Amino acid sequence: MATNYLQTELYKLFKTDSTVVDFIEQGSLDGLWYWDLENPEHEWMSPRFWLTMGIDPSTKQHLSAEWQDLIHPQDLETALSNFEKHCADPNHPYDQYVRYKHVSGKWVWVRCRGIVLRDGSGKPIRMLGAHTDVTEIMEARETERWAKQLQQVNEDLTTLSYAASHDLKAPLRSLVGLIDILKQEYAIDHSADTQAVFPLIDQQLENMQRLLDSVQDLSSIESASQSVVAKEFNLATVVDQVKKDLQFSEIDQAWRVEFNGEQNLRGDRVLIYRCFLNIFQNSMKYASPDTALTITVQNRKLPEGYQVSVTDNGVGLAKEHCQKMFDYFSKFHDSAQYAGTGLGLAIVRRVMTLHGGKVTASSEVGQGMRIELLFPVLV
């Protein structure tokens, strides 16, 4: 094939115009080097290489010893091995990723490529090389690798917690049965101390049951995290369903739910149901003993999504605890008076995270609780 005239012209420019080489280095490379293999200590390194390491080029000599203390020892071994193989066989590529120490202390990843130039007899006499800074690419790969490992760990822990909570329910049921037998055996025992123990045992068993249910609920939500199904649905019907499912919950006084605003919401209906179930249960748990509980749900359509607020007139919470209440196992009330696992609102936060949204709370002691849910527009 005949040589194109532009190729011929470009090769002449390489010989006569140094700005062409400078442009190629600055536009696509992060350093050039040219090594005298007959005098191995002599090696020219372009200024751009030193700048990539944060080094002033004027402080360095054109000697191979100048960079060998900067390269990672393992990578130096790899580079020397590839050099020997490339010298022995031109078909073996001199191409590897190496780490150089930046003046800041961090490692800079560099793709180092080179070609040996030989004399008429085939003897290696020079070597031309090029450096390309690939730190961002390598760090992105490392981040992706760690992300995959963390995802696997998270999936394993989710499976483990679900299995553990599920398997513990069977011995718990057996324990409840054994306690019932003991109650019957000691029914004729009128010792006040003995009889006082059973309500305490029942309470602890109930707490354990709540904890296992919450862990299993949270685990199932984690398992569904890869399959959030976003569809438009009627939020009012979901709120009504939550109310019906909780109508026989243990609460001393009557309670009611008011719904206002936009009827529809876009998101995963199943997960959002569980979100509101936990919010309502939290309101019922901390209802004021002197006032009938009222829970008000307000849904507004905004340009950026949906803003749903759930407000109650319960006992409230100190302002400084409001955002911490979404943490795992967080409790800020007297455990003897208010039973709970501290996982209900953590489930709410997880549901919102899966939707790409956020949850906030505002409250003061004796002033009820307001929880704000912001759902972004999901497609």
Image (cartoon, rainbow, N blue to C red):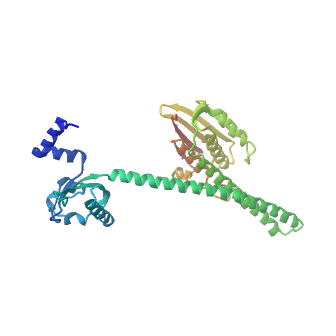
Residue found 61% across the figure and 40% down from its top: 272
Residue farthest right in this picture: 188
Relative vertical location of residue 58 with respect to residue 283 in this rendering, above or below: below
Query: Relative to the observer, which residue lies in front, 181 or 310?
Result: 181
Which quadrant would residue 78 be assigned to in this image? bottom left
Q: Position of residue 317 (x, y in %)?
A: 57, 50
In this rendering, position of residue 351 left or right of residue 288: left
Residue found 24% across the figure and 46% down from its top: 28
Say whether residue 364 is visible. Answer: yes
Image quarter of the N terminus: top left
Q: Position of residue 194 (x, y in %)?
A: 81, 69
Relative vertical location of residue 79 with respect to residue 239 in this rendering, above or below: below
Residue found 56% across the figure and 51% down from its top: 326
Residue farthest left in this picture: 16
In this rendering, position of residue 106 left or right of residue 141: left
Q: Where is residue 151 in the image (x, y as percent from the top left)?
A: 52, 53
Relative vertical location of residue 374 with respect to residue 251 in this rendering, above or below: above
Q: How many labels does the image show?
A: 0
Which quadrant would residue 205 be assigned to in this image? bottom right
Say whether residue 316 is visible. Answer: no
Query: Relative to the observer, which residue lies in front, 47 or 74?
Result: 74
